[in-house]
Image (cartoon, coloured by chain):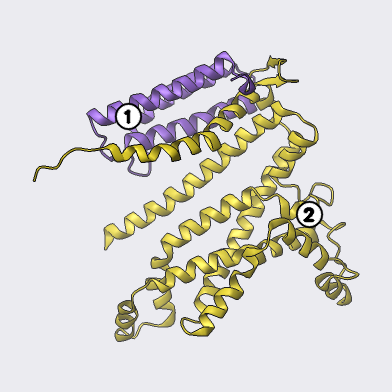
Amino acid sequence: MNKIENNKAWFFVIPVFVVVAFSAVIPLMTVVNYSVQDIFGANSAFWTGTEWYREMLRNPDLQAALLRQFAFSFAILAIEVPLGIGIALLMPKKGWAASAALVLVAMPLLIPLNVVGTIWQILARSDIGLLGWSLSSLGMDYNINANAADAWFTIILMDVWHWTPLIALLSYSGLRAIPDAYYQAARIDRASRWAVFRYIQLPKLTNVLVIGVLLRFMDSFMIYAEPFVLTGGGPGSSTTFLSQALTTMAVGQFDLGPAAAFSIIYFLIILAVSWVFYTAIMTLQKDKSAQQ
Amino acid sequence: MSWMHWTGPTAGFFISIALILTGMTVWQYFSPSVERKGFLPIATTRGDRLFIGLLTSAFIHLAFIGMTELHVLVATAVSVVWMIILMRWG
């Protein structure tokens, strides 16, 4: 067959290329430019080289914020992923109950981030909030503005409430995509409920879970509005995560140079961790399909 | 372009990145890369190794800046050597 080489379709990619250039590449280049200079205004900038990077890397506040950020991201992943899968397994499979469950589960995802923060801020108050009032009535000394452990507990609970539905919905769609033949084969083999989960459902969920874990990791690593509204980063700086530390510097103090250097470091960390996650899961999957 | 506050070194940096990417594209066109397994724990193509190399080079620079008082060009030299090792045997 004589196929005519025609690659004109590539021109259709140009709009996307332009949009990505303006929305991601050029701003990133600008940030790199800012990070090596001390900028006072439109026309006065001084070359500082790696000075800002050095300052940022050795700043104990930022190091603490980075550690806190990792602790937070891994904590919520460790809770949300198993919980999301569990909820997806429990959700009804067909009929009106399935639709109702989907709507109910998806509800928290529809709420804007700072509204979530406000809801939980009110919920955690010990005078009028349901959560705060209940815990106080039980005799617990619960106060998110004074006690770091309480603040952490509430932020993690808030994130779990807000984002577990995402994992649950992704897992649910993954589960629905498994053909019935697998379950029939498992029944013939008299496989236990656990074996069905371990050898049929979990492997089939890998793809959606890769997306879920990556999305949740990146999102939680960039979390800003919810803790900002709920605790304002306090008490002290015990719940100040990376983006809030960055915003305080860039917007609050208008230190563009250090903030740019810090942004680059932040970006590199997210890029590296996401790449490692993605490669690890993809390699695992490839090895598994090679074995079969 | 003035709002971007370009400087010689940053312009040089981005031009070299662009040149590397163009060079790799041309190379890929004339001799397509094959996925292979080197000392890295995963099988990689040429482009994968370039990405890994650039990312680790960035962290090498950060480590030198954060933990030593050495000039940043020392980190660049280490990165270039690392990049060559990675591209050849990675």
Determine which residue is flagged by label 1. Answer: B25
Can residue B39 be seen here? no
Alpha-carbon distance for marks 1 and 2?
47 Å
Chain label for disc 2: A
In the rendered view of the protein, which quadrant contains the N terminus of chain B? top right
Residue at x 67%, y 43% (from the top left corner): A66
**Mark 1 crowd level (few <14, some 14–19, many ≥20, 10 Å Cα):** some
Toward the viewer: B90 or A44?
A44
Residue at x 50%, y 20% (from the top left corner): B13
Amino acid type, mark 2 = Val
Can residue A98 be seen here? yes
Tell me where residue A141 appears, x and y as whole percent. 88, 67
Residue at x 62%, y 29% (from the top left corner): A31
Label placed on residue A13: none
Looking at the image, residue A191 sits to the left or right of residue A96; the answer is left
Q: Which chain is purple?
A: B
Location of residue A188 (image quadrant): bottom left
Label placed on residue A229: 2
Asked which secondary structure carries label 1, the reply is helix
Tell me where residue A55 appears, x and y as whole percent. 71, 27
Tell me where residue A96 appears, x and y as whole percent. 52, 84
Q: Is residue A106 above or below residue A53?
A: below
Toward the viewer: B77 or A211?
A211
Amino acid type, mark 1 = Thr
Tell me where residue A261 appears, x and y as whole percent. 65, 29
Residue at x 81%, y 56% (from the top left corner): A148
Chain label for disc 1: B
Q: Colour of chain A?
A: yellow
Looking at the image, residue A73 sits to the left or right of residue B19; the answer is right
Q: Is residue B62 above or below residue A85?
A: above
